[in-house]
Image (cartoon, rainbow, N blue to C red):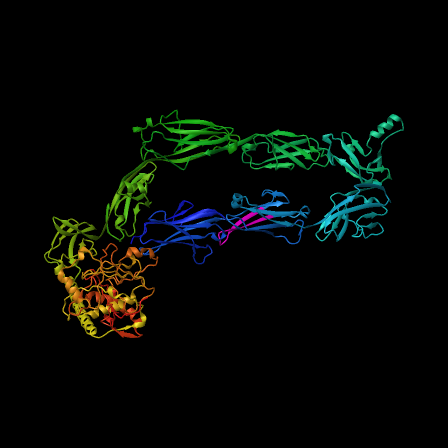
Amino acid sequence: MVKPKSVELTGDGKTLTDGSTFGPLLERAKVNVSCSVKEGKPQPKVVWYFKKKTGGDMKELNGETITPDNITITRVLPLTVTREELGGELTCIVSSAALEADIVKKIKLDVRVPPNKTFISGVGEHAVQGTLLTLMCKVTGARPAALIQWFNGTTPINDSDQNIHQKDVEMADTTFETISNLTFEATRFENGRKFHCEASNEVTLQTNDQPMHATRELEIWYPPIVRVEPKNITVVEGSKLLLKCEYESNPSSLEKVVWYRNGEKVNVYNTTHYEGGTTDQHSLIILNANGGDMGNYTCVLGNDVGNGTSEESIDVNVMFKPQVRLKMEPASPILETDHMNVTLTCEVVSGNPNVLDEVIWYLDGEILKHLPECNGTDGEENLCNEVDPSMLLLQDTTKSFHGNYSCKGKNYAGWGNESAKAELVVNYPPGPAKLTYSPWRVVKGKSLVLSCSINERGRPEAHRYRWYRGGRLVSDIVSQNWTIDPVTLDHRTYFSCHGINAGGPGEMANTSIDVLAPPSFKYAMNHYSGALYKSQNISLSCTVECAPLCSVQWLKDGQVIDPDKTDRYYVVERKIEPQVNRNDFEATESTLHWNMSAWPGNALDRSADTASYTCRSSRNLAGPPVNSTTKFAVEYEPENILVKPDIVRVNENEIPAKVVCSARGFPMPSYTWRREHPSKSASKDHGNNSLTLSSSNTLLLGPVQRKDGGNYSCEAYNRHGSESTVVILDVMYVPECGIKQIELNGEQVLVCSANANPAEVTFSWKLKNDNDSLTDEKITQQGVHSYLYLSSSVDVYRTYLCYANNSVGMSRACERDVMGTKVWWRDQQKLILIGGIALAILVITVILCIIIICICRRMRAKSKSTPLVRADSWHTLSMPPSRSPVVVPTPIPDGSCINEVSIAQSIISQALPALSPRINLSFSSKTSDRTRLVESQSYPHNLEMNKIEDEPEQTTTQGENQETELQTPKSEPKVDSNKVQNVVTPNKWPLKPGVLVHVNSNHTLSPKNQARLHSQATPEESNLGLLERPKTEEKSPPKIEYSKKSGKPKQNVVSGILKNIRRKSDDSDDDSGKYKKINKTNKRAMSLVNMNKTAYVVQKNRLKSLFQSEKPNIIVTEGGSSH
């Protein structure tokens, strides 16, 4: 048997992989899908199956099997693509007797189909204008998704023109449901229009099919569209007017008729003035028109949908007398200083026509003018026609034009009433101003009062003033008097003022003011001044503000310093200009310098040169002199720095003693405590200035850890320098230890290392087990390391403990586990385990021997009884008498358990019911006492019985042939050894009595004539053997060995035991029925097959049924009718 080499899938000539997708496939397309199997023996069976996407069982498909060559079998599946294949899956299953499991290959189908259904929904019987309509076109059954195009009549609707939204939803059968929503606002223009949508996809494009479409006609209800006539109409007051109103709407019946004049509703129910304006009569008739009927008329009509208003209106004009009002341009009040022209207009408020033919003008109730002024001549008549009597011009208006004006007009209907009076107000500014101030001497920091006065106050009277300082307006001062407190440098300038009213500003007055400053220190000396004793640049400075300027003198301890009389000092003076932005007047800066080259040793004495220095000014017009004194001292940097104590020793977690730092210097030094870091990297991490521990001269620390040990620095500093020293903090702590195992000079050594302060430590070693102790171990110490040399005589597991001790205390125990060096034969546990295993094997062997002996004895006792066979449970095959097999007896003592016929008979009787109906049976004349296991799957399943063939290797001696003839029953005729007769197997097992069966060690029948029956093999598999051998095992015909004494077949006891394994499961079928005694003289004797003594292996899980069997073994030798 040979397994298939490969399975290949192709679709229209294209190779497909397992699990791949075949497509795209258009609907109604015809394709061929092939499943090719190379090699395989017996010939594999190839079947195509189809499974729908929606589920269900797989359906077998009919295909054509072709054999392009001797080793390839191809199953071609012609396929016409339909919607049934949507999302489906084709499965090729290859089965063969040589395969342990079927080979399954799958491909998915990518089927493309056009849409199969289209309809439009979303609108009822009608829609109302102004509502937002959404027409929904739904297309189903398309793959890929359909593309929907909307049409308004025959005009395509683009997405940019309308709001179109389309979405695709994949269905369970892999087709798509496409929904396109067309959204638009309903208008009267869509009434009666037909909208339709067309659906297509790439399938319809490739097949040139017409797109599917659906159509929907719309009915839109809209309010009336109103028109009015005539557009204009003019009548004389008291006339009758007809206003027409026409419309178009859906539905056409009206529910409301309303007329409006200038946006206001007309009361058509006033029947004395109006007729019509109702649903029965749309037009409006105005009776006895007057000026109140003038205006623009519109008509509003309403139906069930809504109201419609006429886009145009009717302009109604009714002529009547004018009513006027006076308009002044520019508006009052005006300024006399502007010298403006004022235009008075007599404006018509009501009247038709609204053009005035004549106007009379009044001033304070008296007639000012009557326009036009015409005397009746032709030239003047033409001039009168060009003059507009409704306008009067007042030129270069002054305060004399102030008064109340009015007018009265006349049109075609006659004179109207006089207008209301309008006042013309002409404003003018106040007269010139006068500016005074006090006190006459203005001093910095004092107060100043400015006063502005005017005689002519103007119209309206002036009560506000404008002040200017240095030409800049001071907006927050508007009163007549201005008080300044305090006076600053900013006030040393000129001031201006004038009165102001609605008529404008008056004439301005000006004055200048000089501000004086009394002596004061702009920069005085500090109460204390100092300099380094060896400094070569020492000076004192002061700045005195005074206007006018003043002089400065220097004094030492109350005595005037005269630079002309001593060479130890010199004075430098500098004038500082005023600074307005800082309110600083002019000042004198004076600096006293020390000439260090004139001092002994070019340095100051620390005690003798300490003195008081004074800076003193002179007086001026504004105030008395001022002076400033400083205490001058000689300074020097810190020196003679000390710390007590300089070394501090403390145990870990205790508080160290305080450390005091002291030094000399002036000014008095300040102190800073910091910790010094031992490494450059640590100091870099903490910066040059480490964390300040203390800013006083005393260092106080809390409980310290070992990491806190090291140098602590005290720095004394002032502005001239610094000096530092260190104190050592020695933190002592209990040792910490650790153990490691090393090899030293070929010996195993435990090294105990300690970390301690002080480092003077001692070590002690112990064992963790109290019952054990160190005896001959060598222990040495080098510094903080202790070495323990392990003894080779120790072969047990040990835990070593190490302790380190210094002046602070003893460490916690550190431990190390060390395995023993014991050999395996000295390990009691291993010896017990090995002995137990050996004893168990011995007991099992003895038990198996006892069981085998008991079974052999029981089988021997049972073989003496005559077994029964159930006659009605077998199908019988008849055989001519001449077909009896040749029996080659072998003389073996009759009393042997191994050669008992009953053992073979029982094995055959239990093996036959378990055999499949499709088994090959053959007979051979070979005398070999060994049989080989034959795998049932590798042979055709027909029953075949062969005559003994003559082969050179099977030739026997003359004595052997004579002995064979003596053992063969005399009634059996001679048979031609060169002829072979085949018998076809029945369609059902077990066989009836009379069947001659040869069974090999695999419980299968002989594979003779396999080639002849190979063409009749089916793909159904039969694995009927209890044990299987490799396929490459040589197939040799079974040999039969007979006993010389009894003439019965000789049976191997091991094969009998193993065949009995299957008996228990089949005994239930043989418990009832009729039985016949075995006919030992039957012409057709049952031939048994010997089991291969060396090739059978007992399976462990099948021994139980062998030992539990209690039923007799049965063989069939009874004759019967042939089929």
Instruction: Tell me residue 122's x, y (percent).
Output: 61, 52
Residue 626 in sight:
no
For this rendering, which residue is in front, 843 or 372?
Answer: 843
For this rendering, which residue is in front, 420 or 907?
Answer: 907
- Lateral position of residue 339 relative to residue 351, left or right: left
Instruction: Tell me residue 115's x, y (percent).
Output: 54, 49
Q: Which residues are magenta?
A: 164-182
- Lateral position of residue 269 relative to residue 945, left or right: right
The residue at the far right in this view is: 376
Q: For the point 30% across and 74% down, which residue is it?
A: 1071
Instruction: Tell me residue 468's x, y (percent).
Output: 61, 32
Q: For the point 33% across and 53% down, which residue is it?
A: 43
Instruction: Tell me residue 899's x, y (percent).
Output: 17, 68
Q: If the image is split into quadrants, where does the C terminus sit? A: bottom left
Q: Quadrant of residue 490?
A: top right
Q: Quadrant of residue 497?
A: top right
Q: If the image is split into quadrants, where does the N terminus sit? A: bottom left
